[in-house]
Image: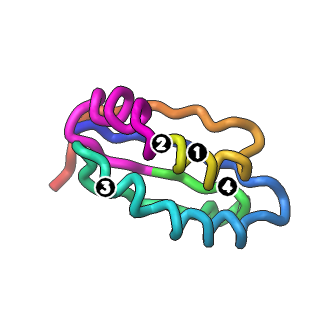
């Protein structure tokens, strides 16, 4: 399993619009092959900053499957205009887990 992590800095004054667009866009990513689940967290200290966490079966499910799909273009059109700067996306694998 792979965890995708992206810090999303939303343009000032656009948080409410971003949240509505994200709710609309969420089924797009959720319908992708290899998708497991996702969370969107809002920063307490910086309210226009969000943390997107997406769990995938494999790295390729995200980087090839989703990003290479027509669905990604729709996702991008719905959400990417809210970001400033463009988010850095990283992928993680479990190293340690405390039950």
Q: Give the residue at mark 1.
A: 76
Disc assigned to residue 49? 4
> Considering the numbered disc 1 on the image, is that residue within a helix, a strand or a loop?
helix
Please determine whether, in this image, residue 56 is positioned above or below residue 22.
Answer: above
Name, please, the residue furthest toward the left.
99
Earlier residue among tags 3 and 4: 3
Disc assigned to residue 86? none
Earlier residue among tags 3 and 1: 3
Earlier residue among tags 4 and 1: 4
CA–CA distance between discs 3 and 4?
25 Å
In the rendered structure, the answer to whether residue 40 lies left or right of residue 58 reads: right
Q: Give the image location of residue 14, x and y in percent.
A: 78, 64
CA–CA distance between discs 2 and 4?
22 Å
| Circle 2 Cα neighbour tier, 10 Å, few/some/many (<14 / 14–19 / ≥20) | some
Residue ID at (70%, 61%): 45
Q: Is residue 95 visible?
A: no
Q: Give the residue at mark 3.
A: 31
CA–CA distance between discs 3 and 1?
15 Å
CA–CA distance between discs 3 and 2?
11 Å
Q: Give the residue at mark 2.
A: 72
Q: Give the image location of residue 62, x and y in percent.
A: 35, 35
- Tag 2 near tag 1, CB within 8 Å: yes
Please determine whether, in this image, residue 64 is positioned above or below residue 66.
Answer: above
> Considering the numbered disc 2 on the image, is that residue within a helix, a strand or a loop?
helix
> Considering the numbered disc 4 on the image, is that residue within a helix, a strand or a loop?
strand
In this orientation, which residue lies closer to the viewer: 62 or 7?
62
Q: Give the image location of residue 9, x and y in percent.
A: 70, 49
């Amino acid at each position: 399993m792979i965890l995708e992590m992206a810090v999303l800095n939303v343009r000032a004054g656009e948080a409410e619009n971003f949240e509505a667009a994200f709710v609309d866009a969420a089924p797009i990513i959720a319908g992708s092959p290899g998708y497991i689940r996702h969370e969107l967290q809002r920063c307490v200290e910086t309210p226009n900053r969000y943390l997107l966490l997406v769990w995938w079966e494999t790295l390729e499910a995200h980087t090839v499957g989703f990003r290479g799909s027509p669905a990604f273009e729709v996702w991008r059109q719905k959400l990417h205009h809210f970001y400033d700067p463009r988010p850095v996306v990283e992928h993680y694998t479990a190293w340690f887990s405390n039950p």
